Amino acid sequence: MLVTPHTEELREARNARDGSLGFVPTMGFLHEGHLSLVRRAREECKTVAVSIFANPTQFGANEDFASYPRDLQHDLELLEKEKVDIVWTPTAAEMYPPGFQTWVDVKNLTVPLEGTHRPGHFTGVTTVVAKLFNSVQPQRAYFGHKDAQQALVIKKMVRDLNFPIEVIICPTIREEGGLAMSSRNSYLSDDDHEAAKILWLTLKLVKVAFDDGQRNAQLLREIAMRSLASEPRATVQYVAVTDPETLAEINSSTNHALVSMAVVFGKTRLIDNIIVGAPATVSLADSSFKGDSCY
Amino acid sequence: MLVTPHTEELREARNARDGSLGFVPTMGFLHEGHLSLVRRAREECKTVAVSIFANPTQFGANEDFASYPRDLQHDLELLEKEKVDIVWTPTAAEMYPPGFQTWVDVKNLTVPLEGTHRPGHFTGVTTVVAKLFNSVQPQRAYFGHKDAQQALVIKKMVRDLNFPIEVIICPTIREEGGLAMSSRNSYLSDDDHEAAKILWLTLKLVKVAFDDGQRNAQLLREIAMRSLASEPRATVQYVAVTDPETLAEINSSTNHALVSMAVVFGKTRLIDNIIVGAPATVSLADSSFKGDSCY
């Protein structure tokens, strides 16, 4: 397993390999969610590359960049076990040298949901992912459905800018009890960790209501709000029932929706989502490079 | 010579070829300036690809997109003679399908000069060039020094977004009499065509003054303005003496400058430039993928 912080060394290693290359971009502090992406890439591609880079430009001024958890040694041990070929650990100094001034923006899809609460976040995401894609040049790139809006935004960027890359969105991996795996779970106190189970309980409640025939988006939203309100440690930022392709809020009845939420516990902001109706992932209808789902 | 409007067919043709690929993006209505880029690519690369696409997003609302000259049949004859391998002629409908919403922006370098007079122009340029690069996947891409700011902006985008591409900037090709070759020269009346020679005469005058020891940027600007004022058919938009790397206006003395101008004749807007001092092209000092100059 080659481990390098240097873009040029990454490029040489990449160019020395032919056949399909699968790529898993991460911010490190790896958990089973990341590893599920790595395993999928390992199954499907001749070469597997992983990047570990806590990208400063996707954190807001009041967000947790400085405290974002890091454990490179442990990450590398995990990736070694998964038989990853290349690990790229670029530095912020190399990614954003003095004079850096080029940004990639996906306009409409980045406005609602996370975009409302994290201004500038997606510009940082799409810009760094464009840089990672151009450096690693994968045939396939793997993202988790926990960050559903991010997955959709990246698929849109890939299609709009003609990246020759298939974006594959894989299911959210959950702890026992249902909390979606996230590096940020490490911030949670024991009590908050326990309380945060309300996210998945709430999403399951909405899905049961939908499957039982409740198609009114506003009533589905209210079911979720009431459920979250039952947990005093939870401060809701948003609960949304949106079109899974456009992310437009649904105001009438729906047969297919992304139910997503952001909830704060203590100082820790968590997000989660579920799709009700089929298909079970966010998607872009007519992508020329189809990211077929893991479901 | 494969000629196709289809991105998928382009990709197949591109992927069937190994070795270096040189790429010349054009808006068509080809002249000796374009052909000089094609010939340089032909000398240096195993495969040569040319795109012909009058990109609507880089034209302002009051600019000449609708009337921009087109002659695909003649273009293809010229490219056939230069032994080009692949010609890609995408349609606006394929490049910008409904729902397109992703833009690439180089921030600082796009502010002065053309940026001041053509708001939004460079966003269209960098976005389409990113799309062309991702579709063609060249090792080398060739641009003309006549559009010096564009060349610099593209080099900056390539570096900032880690495109694995060497950008090569080639000298401006001129008509007898010195007018820089441009598809827009076809708009000029005979009188304006004759009058437009004042651009190159003016640039040469500035260079003579510089080479004779005049290092005061303001005085060099004044020499240019006086020279252009001698031609009653010329309406000056700007004359600038700037740093060739940052495009910052120089207010004191200079040993190396980009002297650039935009001048309108009738309804036709022409640009031209020259570098005084060495090196003789615009450049970015520490590009990881160096575009070595043709000079």
Image: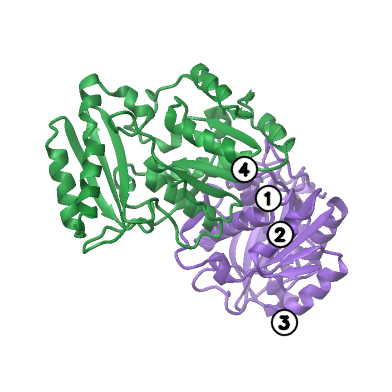
Chain colours: A green, B purple
In whole angstroms, how far apart are the C-alphas of marks 4 and 2? 17 Å
Given this view, does label 1 or label 2 mark the residue nearer the observer? 2
Q: Position of residue B36 (x, y in %)?
A: 82, 61
- Mark 1 or mark 2: name the one nearer the start of the chain: 2
Pointer 4 indicates a residue of which chain? A
Residue at 78% in and 78% down: B74
Q: Residue at x 54, y 53 (%)?
A: B112
Between marks 3 and 2 in the image, the one whose residue lies nearer the viewer: 2
Between the residue at mark 1 and the residue at mark 2, the CA separation in whole angstroms equals: 41 Å
Q: Position of residue A250 (x, y in %)?
A: 25, 60
The quarter holding residue A235 reads top left
What is the number of the mark on residue B258? 1
Q: Secondary structure at mark 3?
A: helix
Q: Which residue is mark 3?
A: B191
Tag in front: 4 or 1: 4
On the image, numbered disc 4 is attached to which residue? Answer: A138
> In the rendered structure, which disc, 3 or 2, sits on the residue that comes first in sequence?
2
State whether residue B111 appears in this view. Answer: no
Q: Is residue B197 above or below residue A234?
A: below
Work out whether residue A219 or residue B190 is closer to the camera in this orientation and state it. A219
